[in-house]
Image (cartoon, grey):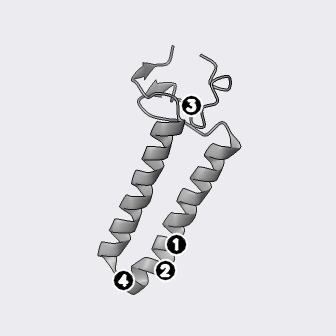
Amino acid sequence: MNTKDNNYWFPAKTYGWGWGIPNSWHGWMVLAVYLLALVLVTVVVQPVYGSLFFLLGVTVASLILIVVCWLKGEPPRWRWGR
């Protein structure tokens, strides 16, 4: 299956379960915002508010990333590389 024809932001991995590297600028933008959120949580939130809010921020950002991948990515399933 050609993922570019289906307009998926995140193609499925060749091996295993989940999504691989983004194949559109939308996917790269989502990944960049996620990484920026992690940097901000690490630099701003953790020193001021402590480890509990750091873990909460990382968890929320990661859950948002997973939801976006689920909605805009190729449907995940176990793949053996074929």
Residue at mark 3 = 11
The residue positioned 34% from the left and 67% from the top of the image is 55
- Residue 1: x and y, percent? 59, 16
Residue position marked by numbered label 1 in the rendering: 40
How far apart in space, not on screen, are marks 4 and 1 (Cα)? 13 Å
Residue 61: x percent and y percent? 44, 59
Residue type pointed to by label 1 = Leu
Determine which quarter of the picture holds residue 35.
bottom right
Q: Earlier in the sequence, mark 4 or mark 2?
A: 2
> According to the image, label 4 marks what residue?
49
Q: Secondary structure at mark 1?
A: helix
Label 1 CA crowd tier, 10 Å (few <14, some 14–19, many 20+): some
Q: CA distance from mark 3 to mark 1?
A: 27 Å
Q: Secondary structure at mark 2?
A: helix
- Could you tell me if the residues under marks 1 and 2 are in contact, i.e. CB atoms within 8 Å? yes
Q: Earlier in the sequence, mark 3 or mark 1?
A: 3
Residue count near mark 3 (Cα–Cα under 10 Å), binned few <14, some 14–19, many ≥20: many
What is the distance, in whole Å, between disc 4 and disc 2 at their CAs?
Answer: 8 Å
Question: What percent of the width, then of the height, locates residue 43?
Answer: 50, 77
Residue 73: image tag:
none
Helix, strand or loop under label 3:
loop
Is residue 43 depicted above or below 70 in this figure?
Answer: below
Work out how far the residue at label 4 is from the one at label 3, CA to CA, in angstroms. Answer: 37 Å
Q: At label 4, which amino acid type do we have?
A: Tyr
Q: Which residue is mark 2?
A: 44
Q: Position of residue 47 (x, y in %)?
A: 42, 83
**Tag 4 and tag 3, C-beta contact below 8 Å:** no
In this picture, residue 16 sits left or right of residue 12: left
Give residue 3's quadrant in the image: top right
